[in-house]
Amino acid sequence: MKGRWLFFLLSPLISWAQDGERFLQSFSSMLAANRTVPPQFFFRERRERLRLDTLSASAQNYRFRAFNYVWRGDYEQAIVWLEKTTALYPKEHGTVGELYLAQLRDYPRALAHFDAYDALTPNFDDIIGYNPVSYLRGLAYRSQGNQEKAIEQFSKAIDPLAEKHGAEWVNYKHFVSRAVSYIATNQAEKALVDLEKATKNFPRSALVYYHRGRALLQLNRIAEARTAFQDASFFFKALRAERTGDYQEDDFNPVYEPEIDEAVRQLKP
Amino acid sequence: MNKREWQSRLLCLLVVIAHYPLFIVHAYAQVPTPTYEQLVGIWIGVHTEQDIDFVCPLPNYIRLDADSIYHLGMVDGSAQEQVSSWAIHGEIVRFDTVHFAPKLVTVQNDLLRIGKNYPMVLRRFTDIPVDSTRAYQQLSGRVWQSDSLVMAFYANGKVSLENRTTKQRTAHFWRLARFGKSVFIVIRGNQYNRFRGYKPLWQLRSLQPNELEAIGWNGRAVSTERFTFVRKLFPGDSCRPSGFQACGNCFRPTWYERSLTHGQKRYDLLAFVTKQYQPVQRESETGLIQIQFAVNCEGEKGAITLNSFGEDYCPKSFAPQITSQLIAICQNYVATDASLREPERPGDWPLDLWVSLTFRLKEGRITELLP
């Protein structure tokens, strides 16, 4: 009993001390961080804004300034700078289009920038980041519900590469995107062909197995669909254990654990 | 590609910006490297300049001895003092094992500034003998005010700090700490407990029955502030914040953003919104609605900020039937999901958080939740 009283009396002091030890640790870390001078001030909005004002005119600086406004949620200024960037530096149409697609989910504007970017080098499927512009255009069309145009663009991104170098050189997510559009247009057989190729390129993909299950379900191949959903569930859980944070295999084709679990539950024998 | 990936890609590009070295040379050319003699002494933490308009108090001290011994400790003695060494080699200053390039450690007007990334400011300490028992008696149960600050020291260890200009009041805990012969007022914690960081330290300089002087950061500069006695606290007075108060004493909303737009959280939020939101079908209700608010570690919500934009991204108002629904949905969702405030590591404190959500609407229907 006496010991418990002592614990209650001392515990605030112990916590107080722990807080102090923690503070000194963080002070030492900050001291070390201060030995360098940063090229930019992440998470220091006001200081970073002043720095941006001092930057010279260049494609990178204009683009970065525009992106900063997007991250801050100042959409009015963001759009001014995005459009100014592409007006002065037309090669930026691609990156700006990708931002409209991925961050702002503004599909008409994304398409306008992808078209402008693609027009810079006719007869060539330009690359934006890691994707051909046709693939990104396909995603924009798909998001607008235009599956036919989406399939056309996805095919433009996938087929020439597969023919020239082989299907193993195609990003498996590109196959998944086209398969999703095939499923949406009741072309499950074609979807399965794409998903088969996708599996070869990434055999542990929950995303691929999930859509394989959907395609098989559309063809009324229930037992195979069940196996595919179970595989999706297994790989989803395995990947979740491996990765930290809110991991999503493909932001353009999000798949969630409850959806997979529900599909498995629906097909329980 | 999410926001972090965008940021890391752009960081790589910006590292090679050609004019960056020139900028640094120009900015720091004016300040001389301090001499050994200038650095020797005790330095009391003032704050870390996290941004132009935002500082976080430093409750520690650095003691730099003439025999090159470096001491780092807490003014309130809440941690074991760390002992190491320090030195100056030409223009390079070393504290412990950290070497600072020329001009990164400066001394001006008895203020020591360390670094440019998160500049840490410490002030030169002068020991001023003060009777701690008398100080406690004079502060406890009384309200004191300076030109900018009102401090009410409750006998139960709580203290409220009120900004005289903004009238914003926060609640914390206080105690006196002896450092050398000096006495410091140490204010820390929040409205709930004694932990989660400090407020600026005040070193007592003189005590009179109706007036005291203390050295500390007054919000604009390190100065000797004169506090006058206002009144005794009444038994019915309670120590409460005037509005939303974060649990941490270094809370900057955007640093504590909790993303609800990726992975499972996105799925849960979208399911909640789909279930709760009643579309208001009108052609004009098209564009973006952005909702932002803070929630403290106990689940108390701060004021809501709502910004809305048309399809052309110019500011635009939406029907109140839409905005009020979205505000209620966002707040209810965050309030019902206590896991959002769970600490990242076991044993850590629950988190304060900031939520920023942007919905894209088409004719009154939600079509997208921006990542």
Image (cartoon, coloured by chain):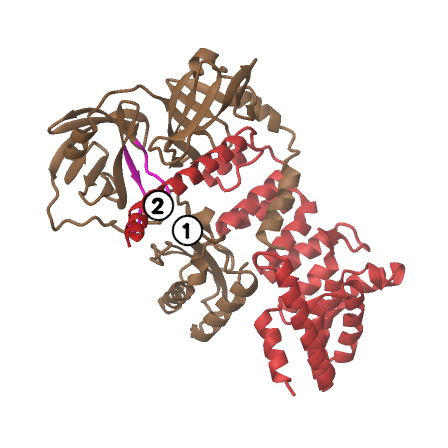
Please indicate whether residue A178 sits to the left or right of residue B167 in the image.
right
Q: Please name the residue shown 37% across and 41% down the image.
A: B197
The boundaries of the magenta stretch are B185-201
The residue at the far right in this view is A164
Where's residue A53, x and y in %?
Answer: 52, 34
> For residue A243, which quarter of the picture?
bottom right
Q: Which chain is red?
A: A
Distance between the alpha carbons at the discs numbered 1 and 2: 9 Å
Q: Please name the residue shown 18% across and 43% down the image.
A: B154
Q: Which residue is mark 1?
A: B349
Where's residue A231, x and y in %?
Answer: 70, 73
**What number is the disc on residue B195?**
2
Q: Give the mark nearest the N terminus, 1 or 2.
A: 2
> For residue A203, which quarter of the picture?
bottom right
Q: Which chain is brown?
A: B
Q: Are marks 1 and 2 in contact (CB under 8 Å)?
A: yes
Where's residue A169, x and y in %?
Answer: 82, 59
